[in-house]
Image (cartoon, coloured by chain):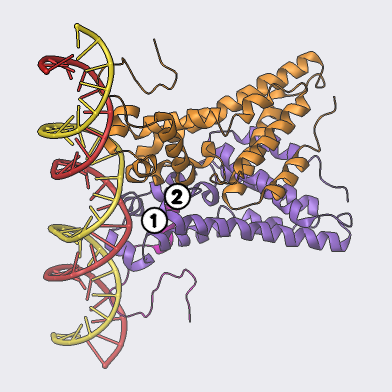
Chain colours: A purple, B orange, C red, D yellow
Amino acid sequence: MIDGMETRQKAQIGRPRGFDAGEALERAMRVFWEQGYEGASLTDLTKAMGITRTSMYAAFGNKEDLFRKALERYTEGPASYGARAVREPTARQVATAFLNGSVRATTHPGCPAGCLGVQGSLAAGEPGRGARDALITWREEATSLLRDRFQRAVDEGDLPPGTDAGLLARYVMTVANGIAVQAAGGATRDDLQKVADMALRNWPPS
Amino acid sequence: MIDGMETRQKAQIGRPRGFDAGEALERAMRVFWEQGYEGASLTDLTKAMGITRTSMYAAFGNKEDLFRKALERYTEGPASYGARAVREPTARQVATAFLNGSVRATTHPGCPAGCLGVQGSLAAGEPGRGARDALITWREEATSLLRDRFQRAVDEGDLPPGTDAGLLARYVMTVANGIAVQAAGGATRDDLQKVADMALRNWPPS
DNA sequence: GCACATCTGTACCGAACGGTACGGAAGGGA
DNA sequence: TCCCTTCCGTACCGTTCGGTACAGATGTGC
């Protein structure tokens, strides 16, 4: 039996936790988002989470585990536009929703600029390879989701026969990644929305 | 009077340097490229450069100075396709050369995958802010170069009147940034070349 | 050959890193 | 009420971080 959040809360026995694990994870996610895996120290993290190192280790494992859990939360929260996008009725709407969502998420007021799945760890030294590889896998999974969706569109006749669904998925993902980098550099939402619109102008006809 | 490399070599007096500063900087650039600013420790750097910490500090200043000089070298070396691209005769050729160059540079065999100007430091903790901001400026300068070139194309009638040169520049830069992220994640040169080709299919007519 | 300016190597600095031992505090079950 | 289990806070672990003091090595100018 596994509880949803994955932060073990085995039985109802013993002293109960004195903080909200979900809220603490949310705060940790923000720190990783803003400073990256290597740039976020345990002191930064626990201070933002409002708990001690000991509590953090007991609840989440270690720094890398915390990062992975923060990434999960990011997927279900700020990056949930991805899962929503692939449920759009046409391939074009999928691509549009995905890029629009990425623009909104990477420039959301009150949140760090950019995308945790990109700037969390793009290049890293030896101790950060785990986090980096986790993000590579994360981006690959998103690309696969898009590819499968576009392939379905090809099969259903929504996209022209012979269309390379993998290329289309990689193209959309590449633009989204570029948007994330731009946002991290301070590009505005309006600027990036125009870029997203332009990237969709050459979409194959239905 | 200033010497070209910027690594001070004031007079011909005193014990001469026992290593090639250009070669050492090249090695440092590779380490930053592969591991990022925060992920590259002085131990990693000096080991790759084949010199001691003391020699590195005497020749380059400190870690952040070394990073800035490595970035200059990167600009004149692996990223020199940028300056070449803006000299192409038409706007379309400029954009094509820029994206093709970015594909080649980010997937060059024997070099780290990706782009130093992106993965060198995208998100960072407090001590890495200098490097991060240097890269933001670096990308902005490249965008400005493209924007000015596209504006010239508009003025000369190479691009339709009323074309937003700034948007075009940001679009090209965004795709290039996305290509860099993709390359850092292991995408192949062929895959990315197809993405670059696709990104140029909706280029405004001459 | 001698003096001087610079470079090199070692050994070290204080601070920050990720991670943990341990004792006291605080709840639930009997 | 007592016990047991778990959580919390402090104080600390060894390691690594970026950076440097200092002494010896090595060349050039006189």
Q: Is residue A135 left or right of residue A192?
A: left
The numbered mark at residue A124 is: 2
Contact, mark 2 vs mark 1 (Cβ under 8 Å): yes
Q: Is residue A188 left or right of residue A96?
A: left
Magenta stretch: dominant secondary structure: loop
Amino acid under disc 2: Ala
Alpha carbon separation for disc pair 2 and 1: 8 Å
Residue A74 in view of the camera? no
Image quadrant in which you'd find residue B68: top left
* Label 2: chain letter: A
> Split into 4 quadrants, where in the image is the C terminus of chain B?
top right
Mark 2 burial class by Cα count in 10 Å: few <14, some 14-19, many 20+: many
| Secondary structure category for the residue under label 1 | helix
Q: Determine the image quadrant of residue A86.
A: bottom right
- Residue closer to the observer: A111 or B104: B104
Give how far across and how far down residue D30 sits, in percent: 19, 6
* Residue located at (57% from left, 40% from top): A181
**Frontmost residue, B49 versus A199:** B49
Front residue (pair A12, B22)? B22
- The residue lying toward the viewer, choosing from A197 and A152, is A152
Q: Which numbered dot is residue A127?
A: 1
The N terminus of chain B, quarter of image: top left
Is A28 in the magenta?
A: yes
- Looking at the rendering, the stretch of residues picked out in magenta corresponds to A1-29
Where in the figure is residue B19, as x and y percent of width and height?
Answer: 35, 32
Q: Which mark is residue B25?
A: none
Residue A7 vertical position relative to residue B200 in the rendered view, above or below: below
